[in-house]
């Protein structure tokens, strides 16, 4: 039984799959949907608090002048996006929450972390990623629960 909880947790860490889909695998493994939801939510919070802290290492890699043209392309692209984002910073938090909360592929915590990194939000994105990820799990949980009630 513990193995199934660990399986749901690990599956919740996979990019693109994340907690919103992993929580639906719990009942297939014999777990209660609610238990599966809580395990997936713990994994979602794990992602929200760690992934934004890992992305800055990309700056170190791509900021290396030895990369030549790749370095210049990267710097120009990132800087242009960050300058545009500064003027819209008050909408960024809500936008990021909504982006991550939509339970469709390529809108989860992993992608939201990448977006927040490009926008230069850094640690400020962690609450938005956590809230959006938990909302995504909750939406999927409610849909799964309604499905179980109907069928």
Image (cartoon, rainbow, N blue to C red):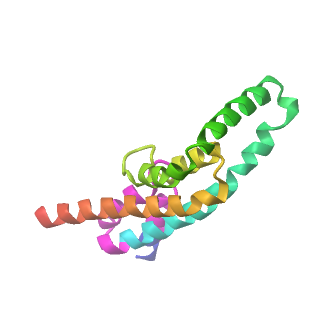
Compared across the picture, whether 127 is left or right of 40 comes to right
Q: Position of residue 7 (x, y in %)?
A: 46, 65
Q: Is residue 32 above or below residue 62?
A: below
The residue segment tinted magenta is 6-35
Residue drawn at x 38%, y 58% as measured from the top left: 136
User: Which sits in the foreground, 122 or 93?
Assistant: 93
Magenta stretch: helix, strand or loop mostly:
helix
The residue at the far right in this view is 66
Compared across the picture, whether 77 is left or right of 27 comes to right
User: Which sits in the foreground, 34 or 91?
Assistant: 91
| Quarter the N terminus occupies | bottom left
Q: Position of residue 11 (x, y in %)?
A: 47, 58
Q: Position of residue 93 (x, y in %)?
A: 51, 55
Q: Is residue 73 above or below residue 120?
A: above
| Quarter the C terminus occupies | bottom left
The residue at the far left in this view is 150
Residue drawn at x 65%, y 40% as measured from the top left: 82
Q: Is residue 3 above or below residue 126?
A: below
User: Which sits in the foreground, 61 or 39?
Assistant: 61
Q: Quadrant of residue 125?
A: bottom right
Compared across the picture, whether 50 is left or right of 147 comes to right
Q: Quadrant of residue 140?
A: bottom left
* Residue 19 counted in the magenta span: yes
Q: Quadrant of residue 122?
A: bottom right
Residue drawn at x 50%, y 50% as measured from the top left: 91
* Residue 31 counted in the magenta span: yes
Residue drawn at x 63%, y 52% as measured from the top left: 121
Marker count (numbered): 0
């Amino acid at each position: 039984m513990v193995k199934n909880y660990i399986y749901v947790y690990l599956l919740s860490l996979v990019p693109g799959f994340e907690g919103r889909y992993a929580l639906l695998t719990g009942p297939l493994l014999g777990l209660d949907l609610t238990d599966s939801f809580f395990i997936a939510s713990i994994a979602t919070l794990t992602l929200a608090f760690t992934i934004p802290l890992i992305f800055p290492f990309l700056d170190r890699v791509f900021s290396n002048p030895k990369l030549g043209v790749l370095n210049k392309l990267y710097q120009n692209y990132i800087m242009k996006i960050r300058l545009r984002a500064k003027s819209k910073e008050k909408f960024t938090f809500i936008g990021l929450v909504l982006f991550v909360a939509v339970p469709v592929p390529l809108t989860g915590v992993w992608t939201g972390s990448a977006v927040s990194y490009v926008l230069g939000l850094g640690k400020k994105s962690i609450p938005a990623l956590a809230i959006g990820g938990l909302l995504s799990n909750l939406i999927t949980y409610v849909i799964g629960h309604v499905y179980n009630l109907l069928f």
